[in-house]
Amino acid sequence: MTIGIAVHAPGAARAALAGLEAVEAVGRGAIGGFVSLSIITPGGEVQNLGVQKGGARAMLADPDLTRLAAARLAVLMSSGPDRPEPLSQFTPAAADTGLMTGHRLPNMPGPAGTPPNLVALQALRNGLSAAEAINRALGDAPGLDAGLIALTLDGEIALANSASVAARDDIGQALVVEPGMSVAVMHNSILPHEALADLAVSAIRDTLAPKDAWTGSGTAIGLTVCDGAAERALLTDPDTGAILGFEAAASEWRRPAWEGCPVRRGDPVVAGGRVVGKVIQEAYCILRNGTVTQTRGGQTITWIQGDPS
């Protein structure tokens, strides 16, 4: 009954929704209904978007997402359909403080009458760290049906469950903090629960920095593997960037018949004797006397410029 995702990175809103979309594609249970998405814009404004049905796909169809693409701070909560309005009660935010999300029912009043997500948000405003703010909201109320994620304006992030939620056998969570990116995910009532949080993080990473991004491409058909000192290298024209061929030390590439990948992902791209990039997408090639005559699958080879390390 709910998943919460928080992202601090360029393109945070789209990335958070990509995480949710991945979970919806694999999981079953309390997903595919409402989404509450809260964002703090680079100009310091809180923007709240939401849908009651349709999950990530419905939210991604919202035209307002385009104008919020530059935001670096975003949180969402999602579950089944038909939740109480306003949906922003699930993802409260303050422009001078940060944002809250979580899972279960962090919007319901705690022992003192205030919802734990608002208790934590006020604690952030009062100067507590993200972890301290969550502890302030949950630490003295083990029976609360809530887990919280707190995200500050500078990307500090923390998550925790109440004692009663932590005892469930269907919860999952992930927390990643590294230069340029902070991500937290927590969920329950979505199966198979063991790997879904990591899946969401992986989808978020892929959206922020896709590993198949490339700057150059060309066909493998007609290219020849020439002898050389390199174990494997893609040779390109230093002026046009066009693929000239392959270099490989192994003699099997020049046999009458051979199959394989003359260059593999991560192999160097060489132009004018200088390494200028690395291979991203390889092609499974059929070679005759060292020349690619066909491919099995796609024929396109892609690469990216820059340091190949």
Image (tube, rainbow, N blue to C red):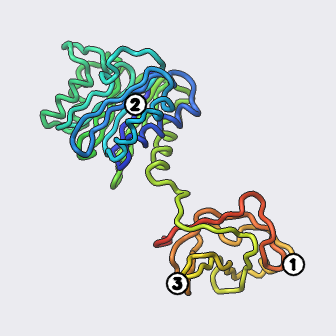
Label 3, on which residue? 274
In primary-sequence order, the first of circles 3 and 2 is 2
**Which three-letter amino acid code belongs to the residue tagged 3?**
Arg
Residue at 46% from the left image edge and 25% from the top image edge: 188
- Kindly state the secondary structure of the residue where label 1 is placed: loop
Q: Is residue 290 left or right of residue 123?
A: right
Q: Is residue 119 left or right of residue 218?
A: left
In the picture, residue 102 is in which quadrant? top left
Q: Nearer the viewer, mark 3 or mark 2?
A: 3
**Which three-letter amino acid code belongs to the residue tagged 1?**
Pro
Can you say which quadrant of the picture contains the N terminus? top left
Label 2, on which residue? 4
**Which three-letter amino acid code belongs to the residue tagged 2?**
Gly
Residue at 36% from the left image edge and 31% from the top image edge: 37
* Residue 53 higher or lower than 178, as above or below: above
Q: Is residue 56 left or right of residue 250?
A: left
* Image x and y of residue 258, in percent: 82, 72
Q: Residues within 10 Å of mark 2 (few under 14, many from 20)?
A: many
In primary-sequence order, the first of circles 1 and 3 is 1
* Residue 50 higher or lower than 42, as above or below: above
* Image x and y of residue 178, in percent: 35, 52
Label 1, on which residue? 256
Residue placed furthest toward the right: 256
Q: Residues within 10 Å of mark 3 (few under 14, many from 20)?
A: few
